[in-house]
Image (cartoon, grey):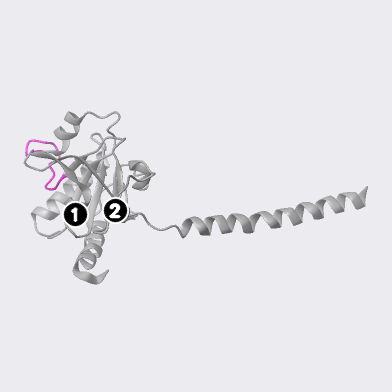
Amino acid sequence: MIKNGILLISILCLLSGCVAPNRAIESSTIDEQPIERLTFQSLTYTWDESSSVSDLNAISGNQSTLLLWVGASCRGCHDWTDMLREGIENGSLEGISVVSIHRYSAFEQTDDVLARYVGNDSEYPIKWPMMLPSEDVDVINLDSGLRSDSDLYEAFLNPSTPTLQIYHADGSIVPIDHSYWASWEELQDISTQMGLLNGGGR
């Protein structure tokens, strides 16, 4: 009985040692997948309330652009929007390119988003483009020119709100680790990094 128990324990130990390497290999394979270069088109408003259907990659204008994913009722989004606008207006964020993207088209009305962000009479007025994509918008792979297998949110790394990302001129996306509430120190670091990228330091 004791010998059988020892044998069973030995087998379990051997089996458990075989599982971990397989998991490590799978994780390594996922990490090595190439980064997709992506874009999409959607209704886009500018600060003066004019609108058009625009392409994200075209808006970026061959430079790294800061993406700010927002919701109409997201207070952290309001905070980051205000800090970005103030920095641009006072010149401390001179040259930074920004695009806001509405995150919750399924349950937030366009009018509510516009009332928060678009136009001088809005509560938290932007000074850059605001994109309002639908959840089922076609995400285009810039390498193939074909529709991506991922939906909008999967393709853009499942952003919550607020989420800040760097969108490179080649259509690749880099996540940014940041706080929920706007931080001037964090924003200065982001601005410096983007300045180096756009200045050829990439």
Q: Give the range drawn in magenta.
A: 119-129
Left/right placement of residue 59 relative to residue 15 reads left
Residue 124 image-quadrant placement:
top left
Residue at the extreme bottom of the image, as rendered? 201
Q: In the image, which is nearer the foreground, mark 1 or mark 2?
A: 2
Q: Give the residue at x 25% y 53%.
A: 183
Q: Residue 142 carries which label?
A: 2
> What type of secondary structure mainly makes up the magenta span?
loop
Residue at the extreme right of the image, as rendered? 1
- 187 above or below 163? below
Residue picked out by circle 1:
60
Q: Is residue 77 magenta?
A: no
- Mark 1 surroundings: few (<14), some (14-19) or many (≥20) residues within 10 A: many
Q: Residue 135 carries which label?
A: none
Q: Distance between the residues labelled 1 and 2?
A: 14 Å
SS class, disc 1: helix
- 199 above or below 10? below
In percent of width and height, residue 91 lies at 9, 59
Q: Earlier in the sequence, mark 1 or mark 2?
A: 1
Q: Give the residue at x 17% y 42%.
A: 130
In percent of width and height, residue 2 lies at 92, 50
